[in-house]
Every structure is written in structure tokens, then in C-alpha cells.
Amino acid sequence: MADLSGAWLGTYWQEGVPTRFEFTLVQGGNSISGRVLDDNYLGEANIMGEVIGRKITFTKRYLTGSRHSVKYTGTVSEDGDFMQGKWQINYFFSGEWEAHRQDDNLTLNLEILRRQKVGV
């Protein structure tokens, strides 16, 4: 089992619209926890979950606003640098997600997108 601790950059799709998010995981045994920042009005959230083999499950709970929780399930690549799966809120909303270990190029791309969005 790969150690998933570290910084990740991902995308989730809701009704075909992509949203980027950054998150940091800390893994201890099968348990994972961390913090997420969505690139939209929902903002920060906490993550709690587990990894068993290559299967990952976690719940993301937002700190402000609606404070709803989102259930994520997925699979981790053999090298531990990529994960993908499905997210779901209750039975009403769901979609796909994916994440890559963060590197300098991905961080730079996200910063460029943010600056373009706010016109800096």
C-alpha cells in the first residue's frame, strides 16, 4: 500500500462543470485525514477516511456555508501518484473526480487559472 501523505491537486465534475481543488493528506496505517480547498465559493473542508489496498474512501465536510458532506470513493494507482472515482451528496448529486500528486507545474497552472479568473 502506497503512502498517500502529501499534497494533491484534483478536479471534480458536477453537471459537466469542472472544479479544481487542492488537498493535503496525512496517512497513518489505513486512516487518512486532511484539509481541502476548492477553487469556488465552497472554500475549505476537512477530510476523514481510509485506504484499504488500492481502494480509497473519504468524506469531505465544508467548514462554512452549507456545511454539507460529500462522500468520495475511488481507486489509487499502483504507483500511488493518481486516484480517481465518484463523489456523492446524499442521493441527489454525484459525479466523477480525479487527483494527482502535486508538483510545481500543477501548482503553477492552478495559480495561473486563479489569476485569470480574478483578473490579476
Image: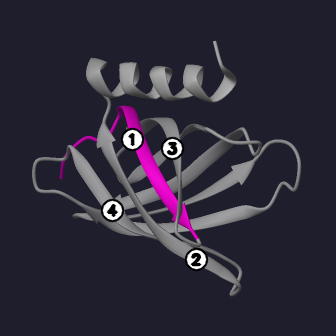
> Where residue 89 sits in the image (x, y, percent)?
68, 74
Q: Position of residue 6 (x, y in %)?
A: 36, 30
**Few, some or many C-alpha atoms within 10 Å of disc 2 (few <14, some 14-19, many ≥20)?**
some
Badge 4 is on which residue? 84
The residue positioned farthest toward the top in the image shown: 120
Residue occupying the point 40% across, 38% down: 9
- Dot 3 or dot 2: first in sequence order is 3
Residue at mark 2 to residue at mark 1: CA–CA distance: 28 Å
Q: Residue at coordinates 71% horizontally, 53% vertically from top-left?
A: 61
Q: How packed is label 4: few (under 14 Cα within 10 Å), some, or many (20 or more)?
A: many
In three-dimensional space, the C-alpha distance between marks 1 and 3, rounded to whole angstroms, equals 26 Å
Dot 4 falls on a residue whose secondary structure is strand
Q: Is residue 1 left or right of residue 57?
A: left
How much space separates mark 3 and mark 2, taking CA atoms?
16 Å
Q: CA distance from mark 4 to mark 2?
A: 14 Å
Residue drawn at (71%, 80%) of the image:
90
Q: Which mark is residue 20?
A: 3
**On screen, residue 42 above or below 70:** above
9 inside magenta stretch: yes
Q: Front-most of 28 and 12?
A: 12
Amino acid found under the numbered disc labelled 3: Arg
Segment tinted magenta in the rendering: 1-14
On the image, numbered disc 2 is attached to which residue? 94
Q: Is residue 62 above or below residue 118?
A: below
The kind of secondary structure element at disc 1 is: strand
> In front here: 113 or 55?
113
Residue located 11% across and 56% down the image: 78
* Relative horizontal placement of residue 2, taking residue 89 as reference (left or right): left
Choose mark 4 or mark 3, whichever is in front: 3
Which residue lies under the disc numbered 1?
Answer: 28
Indicate whether 78 appears above or below 107.
below
Amino acid type at image mark 1: Gly
